[in-house]
Image (spheres, coloured by chain):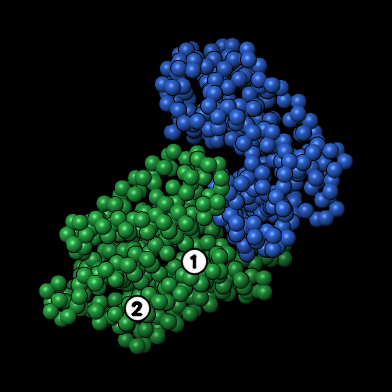
Chain colours: A green, B blue
Amino acid sequence: MKFRFALLIAIALLLALARLSVGPHADAHGVIHFGFALPTVTTIPFRLSAVLGAAVIGLLLALAGLALQALLRNPLASPFTLGVSSGASFGVACVLALAATTGLSTHAFGGEFTGALFGAAFSLMLVWILAKRASGRDAVALALAGVVLGGVMSSGAMLLEQIVPRGLRGDLLAWMAGRIPELPDPSALVALWILGLLALIVLWKAAHLLDLLMLDDDEATAAGVRLAATRGGLFIIGGLLAAAAVSFAGPIGFVGLVAPHTARLFIGHRHRLLVPSTALCGVIVVLSADLLRQGLDVGTGRLPVGVITALAGGPFFLWLLSRSRRGGSEWNL
Amino acid sequence: MFGCEGSHDASASTDAHVEIRIASLSPAMTSTLIDLGFESELVGRSPWCADLSKSLPVVGDFRDFDPERLLLARPTHMVLQPPLSGINPALVTFAEKQGIELIAMPLDRMQDVRAFVARAALLATDPSRAHARLTALDAMSEVDSSAPRVIVLVNADPMLVAGSANYLADLLPLVALRNAVEREGWVECSHESLGLLEPDLLLGIAEREDNVALLQRTLAAIPCKAAREGRILVVIASELLRPSTRALDAMQALKPAIEAALASGKDAAP
């Protein structure tokens, strides 16, 4: 297991190095190509911020997926099951509507980041309240509340999109494609890394509790797990990580679903190694997508990372599914 | 930092002493720049700048940009239409740090196109082409309130027509027409609401040939006298779908076909 864990670290580091070492370069005629191009003093800040941005998004989404799969005891749970993505879309649509109404730029309202953050937080709060009213926040009630509220929030975002002027509609669609921002605000990047690393430590420390949470409620309680408090903690951690990632980069799909399952495939089900391995798998998935995005020139500029993770993540997930049909456990899918 | 409307001064050529390298993030601005003779100065494009060689690097669009490709393209100027949501602050910071002059101008009306031409004239070593265009833009006549009324359809599903305060409406006096739609900007309409306007002519503008039949069918289904009498004209004119100086020529080229459609009441060939 330790060898496999070390392998994951090596792959993540190699991908980071690759992302730092490849990029566009001009030939003698000034025509720009993509390939091996060592960073220069001028290009290193761009590449470094791209690596740090992609890695932290992968880390946040993967850990959010792991926390929510444990919370909901559902292998299909992802960071967006609790309606975070739809809530964030609704928040972005609200900012666009505010900009259209007042005639000001969206940046006057903190930009899409603020809208997404408030929307995601609002959505999480509502899911929490709805689930509590329904049946005391059990896993099924949380998942149902998240799915239903996600649908309502998505409809709200679509309604607002129809109301805003045509020139603003493309903004919501572009945001929903999921993009790691170019030259992100360094303070936002530092805050995300602090949040991600804190979550990694907390989940790693709680690895034994997460293992016990895989048992049914009676067994877990008998083993000393305080179910309500543990679920509350996982809800806050998973929701916060997902909200932060979506606010920063838009809804980048499949990372939170694929990374925990890939890590289980490599490492097994014990959370002591599964937590850091999941984080590494998330970093690997998003760095790979960003590397591909950097090199894939389809003549229309770089593709959004969210499109690449969805295109690659779907077939990969189906492969995991077919593997489980040949005898894997439900948590291997 | 940001460009603003320049004056029409024939002697002005303030930037002409330095090498000009332009990255365009707007297809409409690209079209105008090519028309003004800047094609060899264009070093970067948006994905939608169809008029430019595919070998030019895509350096960004209205929302996103590629800092590394921009650095390699080494533009001295970057032109873009500011989106309604505002210009990406990271792009502004990047341009400031790299010493790239950002020329951000809206192109909603023909007067905006004029302002852009006046600004571009300052970059030209030979601004005569730009000044000729400015003269042509200044000579555009006002709307004649007795001119036949037209509905200009640019998209069939949803039905999108040019409203007032729109560059296409500004171009209509060139072909002795006036806009039947009074709402401003681009307007999404239904067949019924357009039928109530009882226009004299239905004009469809298609980007490509495969859109022509759909626009033709959509216009023919509008419940109004012009549709019943066949006063429908659908043309393929991608230049008209971008607010640029080329739209002037494209609209003027339509004059015979429009006159024929109005006179005969039959479909006129593009």
From the viewer's side, name the closer residue of A131 and B189: A131
- Residue at image position (44%, 33%) is B158
Residue A286 in view in this figure:
no
Residue B23 in view in this figure:
yes
Dot 1 corresponds to which residue? A290
Instruction: Please indicate whether residue B100 sits to the left or right of residue A249 in the image.
Output: right
Q: How many marks?
A: 2
From the viewer's side, name the closer residue of B14 and B60: B14
Label 1 chain ID: A
Q: Earlier in the sequence, mark 2 or mark 1?
A: 2
Q: Position of residue A160 (x, y in %)?
A: 41, 42
- Residue at image position (45%, 18%) is B195
Secondary structure beneath label 2: helix
- Residue at image position (52%, 16%) is B199
Neighbourhood count class around disc 2 (C-alpha, 10 Å): few under 14, some 14–19, many 20 upward: few
From the viewer's side, name the closer residue of B56 and A248: A248
The circle on residue A202 is 2
Q: Position of residue A51 (x, y in %)?
A: 52, 71
